[in-house]
Image (cartoon, grey):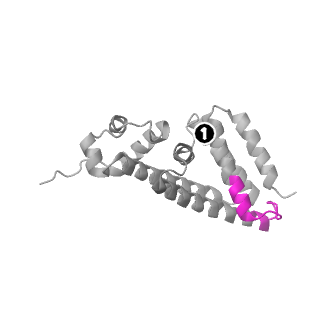
Amino acid sequence: MARPKEFDERAAVGRAMDAFWARGYEGTSTQALCEATGLGRSSIYNTFTSKHALFMRALDHYAERGITARTALLGESGTGVERFRALFAYTIDEEVEHHGRGCLVVNTVAEFGERDPEIKARIDADTRRHLALLSACAKEGQLDGTIDGRREPGAVAEFAHSTVAGLRLMSRRGAGRAAMEAVAAIALDAIAAK
């Protein structure tokens, strides 16, 4: 008879996510995953089947947390430009708090590019969700007169999404709050109605 699992699988995925986020996929050994999760090798492989499968679960966990947070942030009241300002400020605050850890999704794109089709599909799905959310925010901003109406909402969404990714990369390379805030101000100026 198989022994029942004696651990919280979701918590283990969260701890593995933190390990991958800090070191990247290649930089996170199975031993590091054992240490991060508190599980033995056999428990990791019996539950998750492989390092890659655990990474996929960790990436999904991270993406779900991210879209939930962005939906709440961008769903708050305020004008369109105020919501984009809040998004950039939230990103900067998060980077300062986490000391330049960046974004697991952005870090994964930098590490893998397009070489792993399964990871690429997950990242593409996450990107589509974020772009839809940002595009809706841009449309609302155009309706309230705070976002430049000459720009396509989808283009504003791509620009804002790229700005967030750029802020995350700035943080990874050690840029401080003031530098990131200067970039955010330029980005807001670029999308705001004149």
Residue at image point 69% right, 35% down: 177
Q: Label 1 crowding class (10 Å Cα cut-off): few <14, some 14-19, many 20+?
A: many
The residue that label 1 is drawn on is 95
Percent across and percent down for residue 10 are 37, 51
Magenta stretch? Answer: 141-160
- Looking at this rendering, what residue extends furthest in the bottom direction? 143
Q: Quarter of the image holding residue 26? A: top left
Percent across and percent down for residue 18 are 45, 41
Residue at image point 31% right, 49% down: 8
| Residue 79 in view, yes or no | no
- Looking at this rendering, what residue extends furthest in the front direction? 115
Percent across and percent down for residue 97 are 58, 37
Above-or-below relation of 113 to 149: above
Percent across and percent down for residue 31 are 33, 35
- Looking at this rendering, what residue extends furthest in the left direction? 1
Q: Amino acid at mark 1?
A: Glu
Give the quadrant of the N terminus: bottom left
Q: Quarter of the image holding residue 95? A: top right
